[in-house]
Image (cartoon, coloured by chain):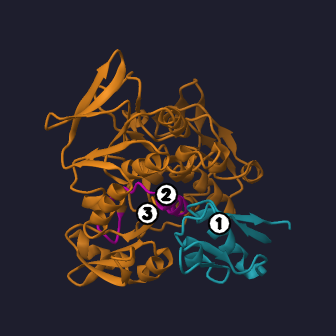
Chain colours: A cyan, B orange
Amino acid sequence: MKVTIDQDKCCGAGTCVLVAPDVFDQRDDDGIVILLNERPPAELHPVVREAADVCPGAAIFVSEDA
Amino acid sequence: MSTPDHVLVAGASAAGLATVEALRRKGYEGRVTVLGAEPHLPYDRPPLSKQILSGSWEPERAQLRPPAALSALNAEFVLGDPATGLDVSSRTVRTASGRVLSADALVVATGLRPRTLPDQAGLAGVHVLRTLDDALALRADLLSCTRLVVVGDGVLGAEIAATARGMGVNVTLAGPQPAPLACQLGQPAAGLLADLHTEHGVELRLGAAVSGLTERHGHVTGVRLETGDVLPADVVVVAFGAAPATDWLAGSGLDLDNGLVCDSRCRAAEGVYAVGDVARWHHETLGRSLRLENRTNATEQAIAVAGNILGDDRPYTPIPYFWTDQFDAKIHVHGMPSPDAEVSIAEGSVAERRFVAVYRHNGRATGVLGWNMPKQARQHRQELTATSLLAGSA
């Protein structure tokens, strides 16, 4: 799995951090998403997929075959 | 209920799409059909009043998923064909083009329709903003606009005013509240919003309801207030609320009361569910019905409903959340703030326009507002629980 983010689409909700705190964080100054691990381990795949689906800015993309 | 063979989702926006994604993520392999009233592939609405209206994004950028991700869902998208009627017992939906679609489970995700003024139909220069096409039509008019009047001092009206002002348009914002969002956010946030708009050159004409429009030769010329004053305009946006799009369900036997009424599982009848702006469901912890018009609810409720379709049998008890971007302010609101709460500043400072405000009733946190502090607001959200929200709801 490879995760990519689009910071321009991020609204700073932090939903991804609530769902997958080991993979996502937010910048302190403006709340924009930070990707901590673009190739998360298999046990985190379910929460990463959920974070991508719940992101209210549609700013997280998951590529399964990369 | 056993796992359905066919799930039909009426509505192809954020809530409808999220329902399909959650079903697939949870392992559902049956047939899925998505019925959309608009001709477009699923797109996101929050950017319409901001990046799409300003032109900083091309319309394609508002699409919720790239085509490959939609294909991977293995769902049939039937677009440009609104639902027009429902037989509840057989979960059969009729459409405008004459299609008849039956399913074992139906998810109603038809969203909202903007409220309009009685005299606005057919009048040139008057707009609403709900769809992508609405946003593009408004943008086209704003590019040659002399004076825009925005009717509506809620989130949508205030965002449109800010975006239009950023495009260099002369803007008047009209509405009945003392400040934008005053009934939702109270002080100090609403007062600060009023300052922000004034500083950027938006003319605020607040505290008086709008009673109608003035026109000449079929083109709008102004907005009339209940005081009798007329605000001149060559473009008007009516953004003073929206009603759940449930007219197609009239006569179906389903309970319609400012939304499709559902139980705590977001179920309106056997095999019929509702998600997003259209759904009025029983919030078990708050002990009352709730309908939320915000982006995150569309997704979270969709996940809950997908689970319940597959047999989870769990209540949906979210902590509400929305955000709004206006000029340089990014405002994030968790929980249920209200003007009668005690408000304290938990971090930052109002003077520096970077703070987190906590709203309390009887000492219990009912809301958290971040002003240019999204991360810190999300951290203070921990103070909110469905139970603490009860303190403001009594």
Q: What subunit carries mark 3? A: B
- Asked if residue B255 lies left or right of residue B101, the reply is left
State the residue at coordinates (52%, 59%). Answer: B305
Query: What residue sits right under mark 1 in the picture?
Result: A7
**Marks 2/3: CA–CA distance:** 7 Å
Kind of residue at badge 3: Phe
Q: Estimate the x, y position of residue B310 in percent, counting from the top left.
A: 59, 61
Classify residue A23 as left or right of residue B367: right
Where is the C terminus of chain B found, in terms of image quarters? bottom left
Crowding at mark 3 (Cα within 10 Å: few <14, some 14-19, many 20+): some
Nearer to me, B348 or B232? B232
- Is mark 2 in CB contact (under 8 Å) with mark 1? no
Q: In the image, residue B376 lies at what x, y percent?
A: 46, 80
What is the three-letter code of the residue carrying label 1? Gln
Instruction: Tell me the element at label 2.
Output: helix
**Label 1: few (<14), some or many (≥20) within 10 Å?**
some
- Whether discs 2 and 1 lie on one chain: the answer is no
Mark 2, residue position:
B295
Answer whether residue B383 is magenta in the image: no
Q: CA distance from mark 2 to mark 1?
A: 18 Å
Amino acid at dot 2? Arg
